[in-house]
Amino acid sequence: MDKIQIDGGRRLVGEVTISGAKNAALPLIASSILVNGKSTFTNVPNLMDIVSIQMLLEDLGASCAFDNNTLTVDGGGINKIEAEYELVRKMRASILVLGPLVARFGHAKVSMPGGCAIGARPVNMHLSGLEALGAQITIDHGYIEAKADRLVGNEIYFDIPTVTGTENLMMAAVLAKGSSVLRNAAREPEVVCLANALIEMGAKISGAGTAIITIEGVESLHPARIDVIPDRIEAGTFMVAAAATRGDVLIKGCVPDQIGGIINKLRATGTILEVGENQIRVQGNDIIKSIDIKTQPYPGFPTDMQAQFMAMMTVAKGNSMIHEAIFENRFMHANELLRMGADITISKGNYAMVRGIKRLQAAPVMASDLRASASLVIAGLIAEGTTVISRVYHMDRGYDGIEKKFSSLGADIQRI
């Protein structure tokens, strides 16, 4: 099994270009189920999750071809409505095929999804939303089954904003009869990217990026060529790594308007940021100031950046309080940081007190989920000695060639 080995203590210097966003690509690829024809997606990252959803679509009967970060999907051959456990268990985003399947074919059977063990992340809001659109839902032996002659538009209210829930129900509603309104919808850039893609395919959607999304159902969609937006979490990861190593890195191919929360928090640490139209230069400070963080739905501070900031805060001056308000089980990386000498106390209510120390010490550590793996890479970059990170398959789910990109910035990092 692959591991990542890092000899820490080097400043990151140079330029890095951000890949397409995994969390945008996955729902876009799922949307190809809605189209009887060939959809083309460009700027698709080369990741295990992309391979997983491609295999899932191929099992449903679609024809897929991936070359040079371009994925073509021909949904005309889809002849199966069941997403089986062996293909769904690896990735929670597999639930995104549920809405498109029932919208186009009137029937879907999808295994309950797997993915990173960072919290319960129930799919009840997906299911209640589909029921509001007229689907009959049953759950039996670990499978969700949805049936409807044709979905019918309705108003859907989310108890809390849910990204995949908003995306799933938006895809379901585009082929429903009549008008649908999603209230308290997720506002993430990935939701907007999907809405814009569906509009390119012929859907009628307004309000994406706000808490209220309105969809007028249409009879059918047509193929389109869609560009995946840059990965804001990858951009944030490299920004934090540059700041934590007191480096000087130009982050190219990003969208600064989508990462305002990360930019503001980094500036509060004393990091110097020069923000351009599609790039950000990050210059670390010798003294990293401690900051407090509370994760929130977009446009608040993203939960997917909490672990990376915690790694940085381990060597900040002062104490930092981190409140994880999205997922109940997303501090598993803290135990691994403790092995490297960090001073972290976890308390009830998902709070972590991080007391800054002078330097981390290298140790063998283990990644527990995707973003935890990124935090351990950052910790390894700033630690004294050689850190070996195991279970890096988590990292391969969401970062395209991360060790190569860090190596190009001067890090002593390699896959072993």
Image: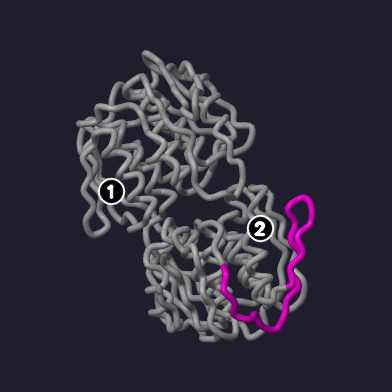
Query: Within 10 Å of the Cα at label 1, are there few (<14), some (14-19), or many (20+) other Cα atoms?
Result: many
Mark closest to the chain's N terminus, 1 or 2: 1
- Identify which residue is drawn at 46% across, 37% down: 167
Of the residues tagged 1 and 2, which is closer to the observer? 2
Give amino acid for label 1. Answer: Phe
Callout 2, which amino acid? Phe
Q: Secondary structure at mark 1?
A: strand
Crowd rating for badge 2 (residues with CA inside 10 Å; few <14, some 14–19, many 20+): many
284 versus 261 height, above or below: below
Q: Which residue is mark 2?
A: 331
Q: Is residue 349 part of the magenta span, yes or no? A: yes
User: Does residue 247 sit above or below 379 in this rendering?
Assistant: below
**Residue 403 on image: x %, y %:** 41, 72
Camera-side residue of 87 and 100: 87
* Quarter holding residue 67: bottom left
Residue 327, horizontal then vertical, whole percent: 64, 48
Image-based side of 59 in relation to 132, left or right: left
The picture places residue 269, in percent across and down from the top left corner, at 66, 73
Q: Does residue 147 belong to the magenta stretch?
A: no
Region of the chain picked out in magenta, as a range: 343-365
**Residue occupying the point 63% across, 81% down:** 361
Q: In the rendered view, does 57 fall on the left or right side of 238?
A: left
